[in-house]
Amino acid sequence: MKENLPRGLFKVATLVSDVLCSIFAVIAIIYGVKLCLLNAGQVSPALRISLSIIYGAIPVGCLLFLLFAVESILSPSGPE
């Protein structure tokens, strides 16, 4: 796709994409934390661990996703 768009339009499209991904990640983090807190009292039948640990992968993964999106937005060369 990079070869098909002019450089300026490619940077704008990538910036818009990174911002939309960041918004999605923030929403998923908020609701992922709510899900973890909601299931804090439940225990997995087979593993005998709290389900909040298992569901904790959602906000942790989305936090990493958000960090990469913010890094792409703030990089000195711009989004590429």
Image: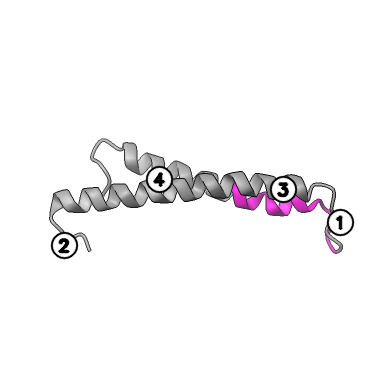
**Nearest to N terminus: mark 2 or mark 4:** 2
Stretch in magenta:
46-59
The answer to whether the residues at label 2 and label 1 have Cβ atoms under 8 Å apart is no
Three-letter amino acid code at disc 1? Arg
Q: Position of residue 24 (x, y in %)?
A: 48, 50
- The image quarter containing residue 68 is top left
Under circle 2, the secondary element is: loop
14 in magenta: no
Residue type at mark 4: give it: Ala
Q: Amino acid type of disc 3?
A: Cys
- In this picture, is 24 found above or below 71? below
Mark 1 lies on residue: 48
60 to the left or right of 77: right
Disc marking residue 69: 4
> Is residue 54 found inside the magenta-colored segment of the image?
yes
Which badge, 3 or 4, comes first in the chain's sequence? 3
For label 2, count other residues whose C-alpha is less than 10 Å away and answer few (under 14), some (14-19) or many (20+): few
Task: Report x, y in % for residue 59.
Answer: 60, 47
Per the image, label 3 sits on a secondary structure element best described as: helix
Residue positioned 12% across, 55% down in the render = 6
Q: CA distance from mark 2 to mark 4?
A: 22 Å
Q: Residue at x 77, y 53 (%)?
A: 51
Tag 2 residue: 3
Q: Earlier in the sequence, mark 4 or mark 1?
A: 1
The residue at which mark 3 appears reads as 36
Q: Earlier in the sequence, mark 1 or mark 3?
A: 3
Mark 1 → mark 3, Cα distance in angstroms: 16 Å
Q: Residue furthest left?
A: 6
In space, the residues marked 2 and 1 are separated at their CA atoms by 52 Å
Classify mark 1: residues with Cα within 10 Å, few (<14), some (14-19) or many (20+): few
